[in-house]
Image (cartoon, rainbow, N blue to C red):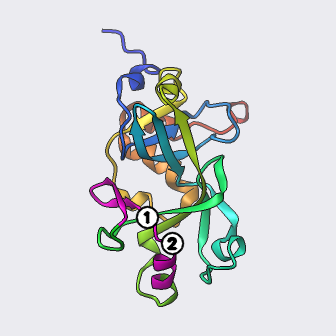
Amino acid sequence: MDIDYFNFNSKLEVKTGSLLVSQPFLIDSYFSRSVILICEHNKNGSLGFQVNKCLKINLNDISHDIFVKEKIYLGGPVNNKNIYFIHRHDNLEENSIAINKDIFFGKNIKKLTHLIFNNKIDFKHYKFFLGYSGWSSGQLENEIKNNSWIVIPEFDSEIIFSNKHEDIWKNILKESGGVNKLFSNYPIDPRSN
């Protein structure tokens, strides 16, 4: 039985709550070594956040209405002047949208920043993003078929909220095993190997 190691992933179906991990040989500099949490996927398209690209500015540098100095991540190129967040508390706010059993897409940023400011919630339970990553109908499926992304259907949510953002891409691939574990050691520039 012949196995095409570069096309086996195209048979995995992306869904809300999946992770997309960029293939190690993806040329696109924007999404190189990206890990994207898919927060919405339906017939109209997909929306997600890069969880491993930390910006060099803090949340309060972007918005003068927010008084907490928290890390903010580059969620993606769409609406990159807007702030979004995910969290792990199903009772944090009534308008939260469940992404999976323990990650939620938040709506009330003022309530969350108030909890942070008053030390009522730990940094391991939320993540802020500037912008989001989006795909029109069928676009993401085509990118997966063209081997731009590895679909990870199940994962430990601890890794999403890890403060060691520079290790998320490698650790997700290692934990998913198989050929992905081999990919985790693929050099950024194969010529330097």
The residue pinned by badge 1 equals 106
What number is the disc on residue 109?
2
- Between 135 and 54, which is closer to the camera in this rendering? 135
Residue 87: give x, y in percent of width and height.
Answer: 41, 66
Image quarter for residue 83? bottom right
- Residue at horizontal 68 percent and vertical 73 percent from the top: 63
User: Dot 2: few (<14), some (14–19), or many (≥20) neighbours within 10 Å?
Assistant: some
Residue 170 magenta-drawn?
A: no
The quadrant of the image that shows the N terminus is top left
Q: Is residue 16 above or below residue 147?
A: below
Residue 106 magenta-drawn?
A: yes
Residue 124: give x, y in percent of width and height.
Answer: 43, 71
Looking at the picture, which amino acid does disc 1 mark? Gly
- Between 142 and 33, which is closer to the camera in this rendering? 142
Q: Is residue 122 left or right of residue 72?
A: left
- Residue at horizontal 72 percent and vertical 35 percent from the top: 192
Q: Furthest-top residue in view?
A: 1
- Of helix, strand and loop, which one carries label 2? helix
What number is the disc on residue 135?
none
- Residue at horizontal 35 percent and vertical 74 percent from the top: 92
User: Over which residues does the magenta segment extend?
Assistant: 95-115
User: Dot 1: few (<14), some (14–19), or many (≥20) neighbours within 10 Å?
Assistant: many
Looking at the picture, which amino acid does disc 2 mark? Ile
Q: Is residue 145 left or right of residue 70?
A: left
The quadrant of the image that shows the C terminus is top right
In 3D space, how far apart are the residues under numbered discs 1 and 2 (Cα atoms)?
A: 7 Å
